[in-house]
Amino acid sequence: MPPVVSNPSNLCGAIVTSDNYRILFISDDAHQLLQLQVGDLLRPDIPAQREDCTLREHTLPDGNLLFLVSRLQTHTSASQLQSYQETLIELSSSSLITEHNLTEALKEIVVKAARVLQVSRINIWTINDHFASISSLINYDKNRGPFLDNLTLERHELPKYFRLMETEKVIVTHDAGSDPNMQELLTSYVIPLGIYSLIDVPLRIAGRMVGVMCFEDTERRREWNVTETKFVTAVAQIVSQTFETWQRIQVQDKLSAALEEKQVVLNEMNHRIHSNLSLIEDLIEAQANKAKDEEHRVLIRELKSRVASMAMIHKQLYRTSEPGYINFRDYLLDLITRMKPIAGAHHLELRTLLDNCSVHVNHALYAAMIINEYLMQMMQQADGNTNKREATIKLNVQSKQISIFIETAAAGGVTTVKSPSDNLITELLLRLKATVEVMPGKHFGFVFSV
């Protein structure tokens, strides 16, 4: 609405009114403007101001009036916008948003937003049971609290208002007492809390409405402008991001706790399995000692060696920090160390040259059992031969390929041994999807991917 100029007979000057302002200009006989009084504002968020100016024309032409009104409005809008921008930056960078305390983060947001927007109440509501009700998570009232007990509004008591919220639009109410959309809330909410004007902004996470943020003025009726509406929408977005961050932290904490609990259970399980397999080893050894001939004694101890390789897997598993994977180098060192006394009795000296690597437990078990079977066959083949022999177990890691070679230092090294174990080695190589490399009398090796 353009300014309207009037010159009352009892006043030397002019009164200018517009949608937002009523401004009184007073001048003297010398056509000098003595003061510009801004009062009785329809925009109560802008405090009264006084300025001194000089007018060239006594009639206060429209151009001058428009300039003065425009200057005041532009100054206020720029200052307001700067304050809003600074507040939004401050809220977005708050450390409380990334911390675990959701309530403290939301309190900080509402206090700062209320101060810069010059409202006395801000509520943050969450939706319950498919919009059957909404409950306030933060109930801020600077005049009564500042933080009051939380409230709950039921859909069956306010059906029209809930349907309005379900449209997921920003609800702008300049006069809550006369707005038809607020009639259901008058007696239970608007009048008891002394609310004149309010704005309700939806809160969304991943595009889904999860709550409402209400900005309420209890001091005056307020004509919300576009800048204010954009500001409260931006604040609501920060609240939504705070909710989302907090939910993500909660999920991460639960996952971490579940993984930690799972790891404890797995460690305990692997420890018990290792203990049980060790007991089985002792029972097998006792049975071997009771064998009536050497052939059965060898067969029983082969079984013990296989059980031992499985027991050591579980020993490594309850030590690892990476579920499902073990340190393959440490595992092979344990395996070879246990076999050295037996190999020494067969005049076979075992040496190792191993790269450090982490391997999935299945790959580690198959590879270790292949090594175990092959070395056992070397010992059997050396029975009756008193010549000392050497075998070096090498583990090489390149990219995602693991190579294992067993090299012999004496001629006539075993490459293919006709024994019951041959079928087991072949089966294990197939499960490992390994390629075999054999150099008669020199080495036996296999390569597999991880």
Image (cartoon, helix red, strand yellow):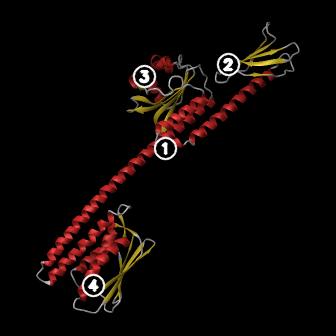
* Residue in front for this viewpoint, 50 or 271: 271
Q: Is residue 449 left or right of residue 381?
A: right
Q: In this view, does 279 lie above or below 152?
A: below
Q: Quadrant of the C terminus?
A: bottom left
Q: Residue furthest right?
A: 30
Instruction: Provide the residue designation for mark 3.
Output: 158
Mark 4 burial class by Cα count in 10 Å: few <14, some 14-19, many 20+: some
| Residue 447 position in % (x across, y down) | 38, 77
| Residue 167 placement, left or right of 447 | right
Task: Name the amino acid, label 3.
Answer: Leu
Q: Which of marks 1 and 2 is in front?
A: 1
The disc label shown at residue 344, or none: 4
Q: In which quarter of the image is the N terminus?
A: top right
Which residue in the structure is indicated by mark 2?
Answer: 41
Is 361 situated left or right of 217 in this image?
Answer: left
Please tell me whether mark 1 sits on a helix, a strand or a loop.
loop
Q: Which of marks 4 and 2 is nearer the N terminus?
A: 2
| C-alpha separation, residue under disc 1 versus residue under disc 4 | 61 Å
Residue with the mark numbered 1: 99
Q: Position of residue 89 (x, y in %)?
A: 60, 40
Amino acid at circle 1: Glu
Label 2's element? loop
Counting residues from the start of the chain, the first of labels 2 and 3 encountered is 2
Crowd rating for badge 2 (residues with CA inside 10 Å; few <14, some 14–19, many 20+): some
Give the image location of residue 283, x and y in percent. Answer: 17, 71
